[in-house]
Amino acid sequence: MRASICVWAVAWALCLVVGVVEGRARLVENGFEGVVVALSQELEEEQAPAIIETLRDILDETSRRLYRATHKRAYLRQINILVPKSWTSINVSDNALNEDFQDSDIRVDIMNGVYGHQPYTLQTAGCGQPGLYIHLTPQYLLDDREAGWYGPRGKALLLEWAKFRWGVFDELGYPGDPSFPLFYIKEYPGRGGSNILPTYCADVQVEGRQIDRRGRSACGLTYTGEPDPNCRFLPYKYQRAASSLMSYPFIFTDSVVDFCDSASSQRPHNSVAPTKQNLFCGGRSVWEIMMQHEDFDDGRNPPTSDYQSPTIQVVQHTDANYALVLDYSGSMNDNYRVHKLRKTARRWLLQEVATGSNVAIVKFSKHAHLVHKLTRIEDMESRQELANSIDAKADGGTSIGAGLYLVVKKILVGKKNPVILLITDGEENENPRIDDILENVIQSGVRVITVAFGAEADPKLEMVAHNTGGKTFTVNDLDEGHMLEDAFDGALTYQPPPPRKDTLVTIHEEVYRGTERTAESEFSVDFTVGRNLLLRLHTDDRHHVTTPPFLVSPSGEVVQGAEFDYSSFTWAMRVPLAEEGRWRWQVGLSGSSENFVRVKVTSQPRNPDIHPITTRAWVSSGARDINAKVDKVVIYAEVKQGNSPVVDADVRALVTPPMESEPAQVYILRDNGQGADILAGDGIYSRYMTRYPTTGRYSVKAQVTDGGRAVINKGFLTSVERKKRSVTNTYDEAFYKERPDICCGSFIPIHHETSQDTGLFSRVSGGGSFKVTDVAGPDIDSQPPGEVRDLQILLLLDEDDEDELSQQEQQVILIWTAPGDDLDLGTVSKYVLRKTSNRSELAEETFDQGGAETVVEMEEFPGVYVEAGETVNITVPVFIDHGETLYWALRAIDDVGGRSPVSNIAVMSREARHITLTSYVPIWGIIAVIAVVVLIIVCVSIAMATRRYGKYECVEPKTKYDPKT
C-alpha cells in the first residue's frame, strides 16, 4: 500500500479537547463566586453525604484562612458542589446551570497512585499561570488519620488554591530531588561561613530538628558533607514563624498564616533557597506574584472588613441542551462545505450525541430561523427526525448575530447546561452582528463552541468562545472530515460523563486517497479496550467502495457483515469482544484518486473495572488571539489510565497551518520537566510551538503511541501498610519516619514493582485551534533559547579518598539539559558559564556585567552543542579555597544573539563536608536541656551516695523539657 496512507490514532471521545481557562471562579468585591467543586462518578454514592458535609467544613475553614492570608482582600463567597447525574439519593438545591466535571476548580476523585491521598494541584504552566484543577480523594476527606499526614485540611487546601488560582509554587524541598533538595548550603555575606539549612521560606527560623528515617540517632552525611537521602527535617508543633504557607502547611498550629513577601520586612522572602517558587518565578515571592494577578493588580479588591461566610449549594449535572447554529449563506456552497456539514451533523445526531440530551437546529444567512425545535433524544426515531431536518440548500448573506440571538433569547432561555455549536465560513455582513448581541450571550450562561469553516470565517469567533468558556476549532477545505468531526465531538464533553463501562474510546483513525484497488491497515486492541468494537468506514462516493470492509483478527479469523447507511455513505460493523493484539481492516476500492475513504475504530473498556488508557490535548492559548512575536504557545497532551500517568510514550503534535498548501508541522512532545514541561513523569507531554509561516488559524492534533516502552506509573502501594496514628499525635519522631514524602519536585519517581507495561496502544486527541494575528516573518528569529533549569555540579572525587578535598584544584562535572535555539526546539549556538563567590553577580540583571568569572564559553567543547532535550556533560578544573562557596550559572545564546534567561544557580562549597548540621533548637530550649542534664548528674550522684550511705533519695522533677512542644 502506498505511503499516501496517513495513519492516525485517535482520542477518547469524551475528553477530545480541553480548552484551558482560568477556572470559572470570579473575584467580585473581595469574594470568589462561581467556585465549582465536582464529585466524580467513580466515587461510591453512599459516601457522598459525608463527603459533602466534610467539604462544607473545609471550604469554610479555607475561606477564613484565605481572608487572613490575603490581608482581608479575598475569601470564598459562593460555591457549587456538583454531583453526578446518575446519583439519586443526594439532596440537591438545583440542576447545574453550566457546571461540569472537566471544567471544575476542585475535583474529588479516585486516587492518583503517585500522589496517594495527598492534595495536589495539576500545574502545567509557568509562574503566574493558573493550574488546571485541585485534586482531593474521598479517603483524604473522610479519614482524619489519612489527612493528618498533610496538616489541617483548610490550610492544605489554601496552599493548593494559591497554586491553582495565582500560579505560585511550593517553597519546600523534596527527598532525592536534585533541583529542589530538602537541605541547601546558605552563605552568610559579611559574616563569613556557611551552613546547611532545610529548604523553606520563613520570616524567622523554623524550629525543629533532623531525624533519620532508618532509626539512627542522627542524620548521616554524604562525602560532600550534605545530609544523606534518609535525613528529614522535623519542625516542632509550636513555632514563632508566621510564614510561609507554601513551606510547611502540615504544622498543625495556627502560627504559620502568611505568604512570604519580597517587599516586607515582617515576612521577608528567601530568594536563595532552591524552591519551585524561586526557580519558576525568578526569585520573586509568592505575595509579589499574587499582587500582579488581575485579582489584585492596580489596587483591585483592597482590604475589606466585610467578611461573609461562604454560601454552599449542591447542584446536579444535567443533560446538555444543544443548539446547532449553522451557516447557510451562499458561500457555504463553495468546496462542498454545506454537504460536508450535513453529513457530519447527521452522523453526530444519529450516532454520537447522548440519549437524554436535547437538541435544536437553527439556520442563519441574512436572517435566522428555527429548523427544528428543542427535542429530547430518546430513541432512533427522535434522532432520525432531527437528522432529516438538515438539508443542503444554502443562499444569502451572513448574520451570525441573528443566529446567536434567536437561541439565547427564545430557544435556550432558562435551560440548564446550554451549549451552542456555531459553524460558519464567512465574515458577517448583515445585522445584527456579534458585537451587538455578545453581552446577551454571556449573560445567558451558554457556552459557545465555534467552528471556522475555511480561511475566511469571521475573526470574532475566538472572542465569542473565550468569553463564554467555550472552545474553538477550524476546518480547512481539504479536510476529509477529521476536523469537522473533531469539532462536533468536542461538544460531547459537556454531556454528563457516562459510567466507566460505557466510555467510548477511539483507538484508530485513518484516511486513504489514492489509485490502489485495495486499502488496508492495522490497528492495536490493547488490554484496556475491546468490548463493542465498532469499525465505521465513510466515503465521499458510495460507488468508490467495490467490496465491503472486513476485519482480520490477531488469530486470523475474518469478520464480515458490514452494513451500509445511504444517508451518510458509511459502512459499519461491530465485534462484541475483540481479541487483544494486532487487527487488520481491508476494503476494495474503485481506484479513483478523486475519492477517499476514512476509517474510524472505537471501543468500550474490555473490563468495566479497569480504566481505559485515554488522552486529551489542548493549547495554552485557549481561545485567545496570539501575537507570535511575543506570545509563547505550548501544546499539551495528557496520557493516563484512570488517574495514573502513562510515561515514556511517543507523543507527537501535528499542527495544520492556515495555508492549505503548507504541510502539517510535527512536534515531538516531551515529559522531561524541561522547556515547556515543568514536571517530569506526570503523564503530561508538552512543547513550545515555534514555527508560524503566516497569520491565520492553526489546528492541533496529538498522536500517541506506546513507542515500545510506555508504562503506567501506579505509584506506591504502601499507604494501607502504614501504621494508623492519631492526628493529635503527629509531632513525634515515629510519625515523621512513617510519614509519606510530599510529591513532587522536578520529577515523579516511578516504582517498577508497581508499574505496568501498556503493550501496544494508540490514541489521538484533537487539540482544537487558535488564531495567530501577527508573526515575525520567515527570516526573523524572534524566539530566544529556553531556560536551563537543572544545572548540577558533581565533584570528581573518590568517596574513600579522605585527602582529595585537601587539594586546591578540583575536577567538577557540569550537567544540564540542553535548551533549543528557539525555546525548546533546535540547537543553541553558544553557552556562557560563570562562577563567583558572590551570588548576586549571577542575577538576571547582573549576569552580563562581568562581575562573575567566565569559566568557559565552551568553544573547546564541540560535543556540548546537542539537540534540545539531550543531556550536556562536561568536566572542568576548578580552584576553590578553604571556607569558600562558589555559585555557578549559565546562559544560552542563539545564532542571532538571542539570550536565554539565566539558569538555576548551582552551589559548591569547599568545606561542605566539615559543616556541622544545625539542630534548630531555640536558645531557651538549649538552656532547659542543660538544666535537665545537670539535674540528672546530681540525681545520679545522690543515688550513688544513697546506695553507699542509705539515707538520701532522688526526687523526679515536676516539669520536664519536651523539645516537641
Image: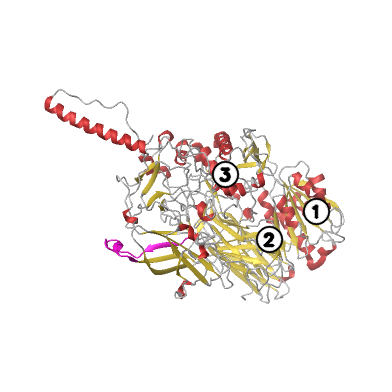
Q: Which of 596 and 363 is in front in this view?
A: 363
- Count neighbours of disc 3 (C-alpha within 10 A) and say few if under 14, some if 14 to 19, many if 20 or more: many
Residue, disc 1: 434
* Left or right relative to 98: residue 932: left
Instruction: Say which residue label 3 marks.
Output: 161
Mark 1–mark 3 distance (CA, rounded to whole Å)? 35 Å
Write down the residue under mark 2. 626
Q: Residue at x 36, y 49 (%)?
A: 231
Whether residue 837 appears in this view of the structure is: yes
Secondary structure category for the residue under label 1: helix
On the image, the x and y values in percent for residue 916 come to 32, 50
Q: Which residue lies furthest to the front in this view?
A: 190
The disc labelled 1 sits on which kind of residue? Answer: Ile
Q: Is residue 490 above or below residue 708?
A: above
Q: Specify the segment rendered in magenta.
A: 790-809
Q: Which residue lies furthest to the left in this view?
A: 948
